[in-house]
Image (cartoon, rainbow, N blue to C red):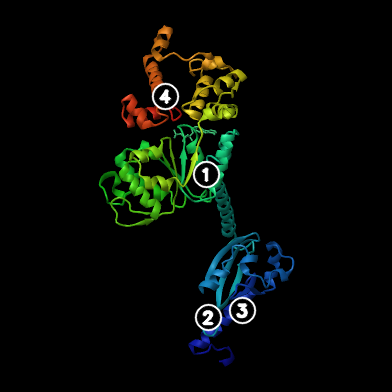
Amino acid sequence: MNSAFALPLDDDGVLQLAAQSMFEVFARNAEGMLVVDRNHRIVWISEGYKRFLPALGFEDERDFVGHRVEEVIPNTLLAQVIDSGRPILVDLLTNKAGTFLVSRLPLRDAAGAVIGALGLVLLDHPETTMQPLIAKFGRLQQELADARRQLAAEQVKNRRPKYQIASFIGSSPGALELKRLARRVAQTDASVLLLGETGTGKELLAHAIHAASQRAPKALVSINIAAVPETLLEAEFFGVAPGAYTGAERKGREGKFKLADGGTLFLDEIGDMPLALQSKLLRVLQEQELEPLGSNQVIKVDVRVIAATSRDLAAMVAAGSFRADLYYRLNVLPIKVPPLRERSDDIEALADALSEDIARRSGMPARQLTPEALDLLARQRWPGNIRELRNVLEQASMMSDDLQLTPDHFRGLLPLAAGRPRPPAAEEAAAAPEALLRPLPEQIAALERRAIAAALAQTRGNKLAAARLLQISRAALYDKLAQYGEDLAA
Ligand SMILES: Nc1ncnc2c1ncn2[C@@H]1O[C@H](COP(=O)(O)OP(=O)(O)OP(=O)(O)O)[C@@H](O)[C@H]1O
């Protein structure tokens, strides 16, 4: 036997021979090879590799060799192989040059340290048996990329805020000053207190301030304190630890503070906050940490608070029903939202925008208001403010097909319609007996709506006081408000 063709007898010799043969096989049969140094720079490419350069967007080899691999080969994992020291024996790589079967191996020095990596393009021939698989993989990759793009576009659309500062319609001096202030506070991270009557746009502004702030990519979470029963408020705010309760709460629940982490928490009707909870809220605002109910673990949160109220908080502090320290904490950036009657110059722009919105939602044509109708609207007191204006426009549009609304269309909807005050309900009924022949539930609902509107107007939007005035519970009032639509306020 000729010893020149014999295999070496020791392990090292066998391995060395295998390594050498393997490399030669790869080098001869691979479509292309490249070597990258420890700093991810391409130091060498094989002759075969050069034909991929145009498809990768490089006419000149010098624009490719010497550059960091992740900058010139999209989707490559060679850098990862160098950093982890682990090979990727077989993989499919898809980029603008096509889909390839590739192999990536770390290169080590004599001491075993990674000094670079070798990348091999094993196959790219259409006639190989792998090709249907590669083609299918390429198609799937393409579909995945399309789906991801669509999803990202959807997410951007969904994240787009409901309201921006420009959505606050009005160019009267009061409205302009308000928008200027809103833009200013959006640049800061301090607590904001929105003070104004019901329906003046406080919630809209809270959304707009959040949207204009650096927290815009994160959530704005709202909680209407007056609408949540007192006993549930604490859990609603701070959450419940798993196992703290039996039944529905067994699994625990995240509180609004946690949900708003990184974003903004809008506390509507802050004046209705029970005293006991006020001190807990103050602590969270100061420490930016909380303990869910039934847990002894402290959770860190990063939340900006925007609070709103239609009540006179300063008077409540004086009367001892609102904590002074919480008031000062929230009152860092107070913003007064003017009532509609103080910015009647804005009525026309508001009526236009609201009419268009009503038309869009109802599928009916948008109505125009005659100058006389606008004048009539400008003379109202609007205790329910813009919500009430919207409500009145909606009712007037529902009751007629006319494209132009005149003062007559508002008869019965406004106290000053057609220049005469609306008679109280009983007198009105007596004056128009045929009105009593309408279905009873309809009449009762109409009376209920008017009574609630009157109570809210009387209490300047304070729902608790309105409920007391009507001698119904706060929860019953909220039920009715929900039943008649959130736009019932006056
Ligand atoms: N300047 C404005 N431009 C356009 N729409 C407005 C404006 N202000 C308020 N609105 C609309 O009026 C309605 C009531 O506004 P919003 O709910 O923000 O009032 P609010 O002051 O928070 O009321 P409440 O104190 O009763 O919760 C909403 O439909 C809102 O979109």
First in sequence: mark 1 vs mark 4 = 1
Disc 3/disc 2 C-alpha distance (Å): 23 Å
Q: Are marks 1 and 2 in contact (CB under 8 Å)?
A: no
SS at badge 3:
helix
Disc 1 Cβ-to-ligand 1 distance below 8 Å: no
> Circle 1 is placed at which residue position?
209
Identity, as a three-letter code, of the amino acid under mark 1: Ile
The reply, left or right, for residue 1 in relation to residue 203 is: right
The reply, left or right, for residue 314 in relation to residue 71 is: left
- Residue 73 figure quarter: bottom right
First in sequence: mark 3 vs mark 1 = 3
223 over 370 or under it: above or below: below
Bin the neighbour count of mark 1 within 10 Å (Cα to Cα): few under 14, some 14-19, many 20 and up.
many
User: Could you say where residue 423 lies in the image, as x and y percent from the top left?
Assistant: 44, 13
Disc 1/disc 4 C-alpha distance (Å): 29 Å
The reply, left or right, for residue 467 in relation to residue 123 is: left
Mark in the foreground, 2 or 4: 4
Q: Are marks 1 and 4 in contact (CB under 8 Å)?
A: no
What residue is at 53 percent from the left and 14 percent from the top?
A: 419
> Circle 3 is placed at which residue position?
24
> Circle 4 is placed at which residue position?
453
SS at badge 4:
helix
Disc 3 Cβ-to-ligand 1 distance below 8 Å: no
First in sequence: mark 2 vs mark 4 = 2
Residue pushed farthest front? Answer: 318
Mark in the foreground, 3 or 1: 1
Mark in the foreground, 3 or 2: 2
First in sequence: mark 3 vs mark 2 = 3
> Circle 2 is placed at which residue position?
113
Identity, as a three-letter code, of the amino acid under mark 3: Glu
74 over 190 or under it: above or below: below
- Residue 447 figure quarter: top left
